[in-house]
Amino acid sequence: MDDTQVFAALAKNLARRNLSEGQLSSLSEALKNAKHSVIGADICTHGICLDFGVDGGFESINLTDFTDISIGDIHNIEIFPEGIILPDRMRVRVTQKF
Amino acid sequence: MLTNSKIVHVHPTRLCNFECKHCYSSSGLQSKNSLELSKLLYTTAQLYEYGYRQISLSGGEPSVYPDLFEMCANLIEQKFAISLISNGWKPNVLEKLHDGKLVGFTAISFDGLEHNHDNIRQRSGSFCRAIESLQRLSSLGARTGAVLSVTNSSLEELPELVELLATTGVKKIQFHPIAQIGRAKTSRNSELNELSEEALARLILLSGVFSKMWPKIDFHCDAIFGSRLIKEKLIGANDTISPIVVTEQGEILPIAYGMNKKLGLGKVGFKLEKPIASDALMRIVELTKRDCSERVATTFFSELVRNSH
């Protein structure tokens, strides 16, 4: 299955199924209680990806700020600089089962 | 700012060749109110002086507005960029606007796949004609988009509908959750119920998936996670309001069609002060923002219109 087919299946799944009360509550709590600004929420092949913006460099990142969020099991965490436009800001992407 | 671009939404008429079940402006064949062109142009000239550069035409149905071509030609002369939202029933008119370089971007509105769309529009063949309009405009090299009203039943159809629209060459797709405004409110039709928070959350996530599937199309969702609103500065004292709305009755309103007329900024044809946010408007915006930020997902602008009354 290539990426296109996976995302097509994800889209159909998302369009047709209802999120359970538990999933909705988890998402709501995660978004409300996040210690850093939530830049984006996205569905990916592993679950849900929440993107956070953190001011400062790598040294300013405290991983427990992100691992405490309990939407689901964490698949991976990516940390990368925002880039030229925002050189003093990092982005943290947490992918969790959803 | 509510939006960084300075935009004027002009509704020159509530005359429409359809009577859609959910129409926010209750437009239809019987609605004869139209803007007097000379008064509109007097106002838009003032708005240009205040920094507004974009005009978005809707209605009603702009392609049945009698003075459409003259209006567009004059607005172009006033140096505005023009976009238009149409039901797509008159592709000849849309083609002519494109050929005459009068409209830079045309969006066609949809209400789901063929059965749902034709049912909401109450016109058999309206879906096929709308798709035809997009295809014809695209073959001329026109920039096109689609505005999708999302109901509970059309939400399930979005993957197939978006796939079809992608084949027509659209550059933008906007998802607009149905709001209990206008005919949607008065009809008390359960198929027009607003989406739940759960459905809105799925819609937001779905638009993200579509962005990955079709990276060349710009997807925009009119629903927002409530927590995002906390951090947004929406409008402040001395901010110039954008968008502003000109109604078919000549009212100039802040932000959205349906806002309370007590917040009105003036009337077309009269001298207009610079559209700066009033204390009353800012209070309503902040109250709405606070309420909406308590929700998982929300249609902020629909709530703003409701709270303004």
Image (spheres, coloured by chain):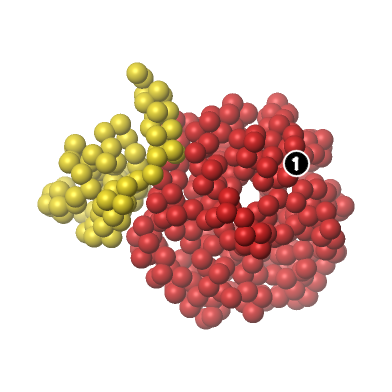
Chain colours: A yellow, B red
Tag 1, which chain? B
Residue at which label 1 appears: B123
Q: Residue furthest top?
A: A1
> What amino acid is found at the position of numbered circle 1 in the picture?
Arg
Tell me where residue B189 appears, x and y as whole percent.
62, 55
Tell me where residue B67 appears, x and y as whole percent.
86, 53
* Residue drawn 72% across the image and 59% down it: B26
The part of the image, by quadrant, that contains residue B108 is top right
* Residue drawn 75% across the image and 57% down it: B27
Left or right: A56 in relation to B163: left
Left or right: A56 in relation to B231: left
**Label 1: how many residues lie within 10 Å, few (<14), some (14-19) or many (20+)?**
some
* Residue drawn 49% across the image and 58% down it: B299
Q: Is residue B227 visible?
A: yes
Above or below for B278 versus A91 = below
Tell me where residue A71 appears, x and y as whole percent.
23, 48
Count of marks, rendered view: 1
Q: Nearer the viewer, residue B46 or B283?
A: B283
Q: Nearer the viewer, residue B44 or A97?
A: A97
